[in-house]
Image (cartoon, helix red, strand yellow):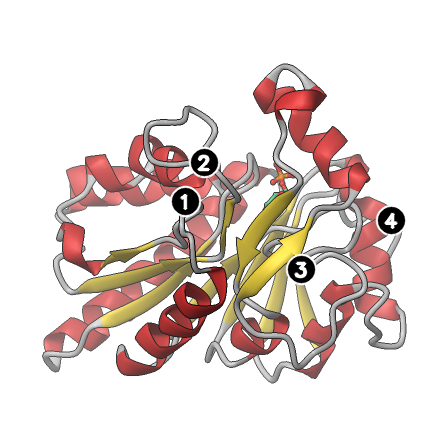
Amino acid sequence: MIATRLHPDKQSAAQAVAREIAGLIEIRSKSGKATVLGLATGSTPLPLYAELIRLHRESGLSFRSVITFNLDEYEGLGADHPQSYRRFMEEHLFRHLDIPAANIHIPDGLTKDAAGHCAAYEAAIRDAGGLDLQILGIGRTGHIGFNEPPSSCETRTRWVHLDEVTRRDNSVFFGDLNQVPHGALTMGVATILEARRIELLAFGEAKADIVARAIKETPSDGCPATWLQRHPACTFHLDAGAAQAL
Ligand code: GLP
């Protein structure tokens, strides 16, 4: 069952989710526990990251006890590539916070051993105690992370082939479709579903159809976001545009 929360605009949605994350960090750090966050890239979480940075600067929210695992990374792109998700996260979040570098995990797009690297990524999430809260966006193909259709609910962190729709959507960031990688490493659907809480953000009319499908269609490999219906604590944070087909 997916809960939906309609917000007046993306800033309000970002503030609500940032407050929730801040509350979680404060409660857990009081009892000496780390907070394990699953993080997403794309344009959607940007206002959320801006709000977390504001809370750190203006309200003293500390990220010293936070451990992060990003959902995915493009194949072949390293930290020095402007479109790598490693670079994206550094620029839009990590460099503005007090999070220790050792607490940050992002799949390595340059790995020569994808299977071994992905198995180690799963083990690192388990060793950290599992994801307390996962942030998600949604792709127009119904992907979460880079779990393109078809993706079963049993998939784990692995190498995936990117859908052409996704490559075209993301080509705006690369400037040229030919520069967009054909593959990626992504947490699996099962990995995501094991997070104790999931907050998905979707804004704008372009996401309305896929949001409605994710919520209403019978869960299937053909629309991986439908697997979120199986999660006990998943909320979709929407603006009016993204909610208009519900
Ligand atoms: C990208 C990411 C996803 C993201 C999605 C939507 O391809 N791998 O994690 O949710 O596409 O992107 P945007 O937020 O820019 O619409």
Decide which of tag 1 and tag 4 comes sooner along the chain: 1
Residue 152 in sight:
yes
Of the four image quadrants, the one with ligand 1 is top right
Q: Which mark is residue 147?
A: 3
Nearer to the camera, 142 or 201: 142
Label 4 is placed on what type of residue?
Asp
Task: Give the foreground label among 1 and 4.
Answer: 1
Residue name at image x 70 percent, y 78 percent:
153
Residue name at image x 73 percent, y 74 percent:
227
Q: Quadrant of residue 173?
A: top right
Instruction: Find residue 144 and report its horizontal and vertical position in percent.
Output: 64, 58
Count the marks: how many? 4
Task: Give the foreground label among 1 and 3.
Answer: 1
Label 1 is placed on what type of residue?
Leu
Asked if the residue at tag 1 contacts the one at tag 2, i.e. Cβ–Cβ closer than 8 Å, the answer is yes
Instruction: For label 4, count other residues whose C-alpha is less than 10 Å away and answer few (under 14), some (14-19) or many (20+).
Output: some
Q: Quadrant of residue 54?
A: top left
- What residue is disc 4 on? 209
Q: Rounded to the nearest whole Å, what is the CA distance between mark 2 and mark 3?
A: 18 Å
- What residue is disc 1 on? 110
Decide which of tag 2 and tag 1 comes sooner along the chain: 2
Q: Rounded to the nearest whole Å, what is the CA distance between mark 3 and mark 4?
A: 18 Å
Residue 241 in sight:
no
Asked if the residue at tag 2 contacts the one at tag 4, i.e. Cβ–Cβ closer than 8 Å, the answer is no
Q: Is residue 124 left or right of residue 43?
A: left
Label 3 is placed on what type of residue?
Asn
Task: Give the foreground label among 3 and 4.
Answer: 3
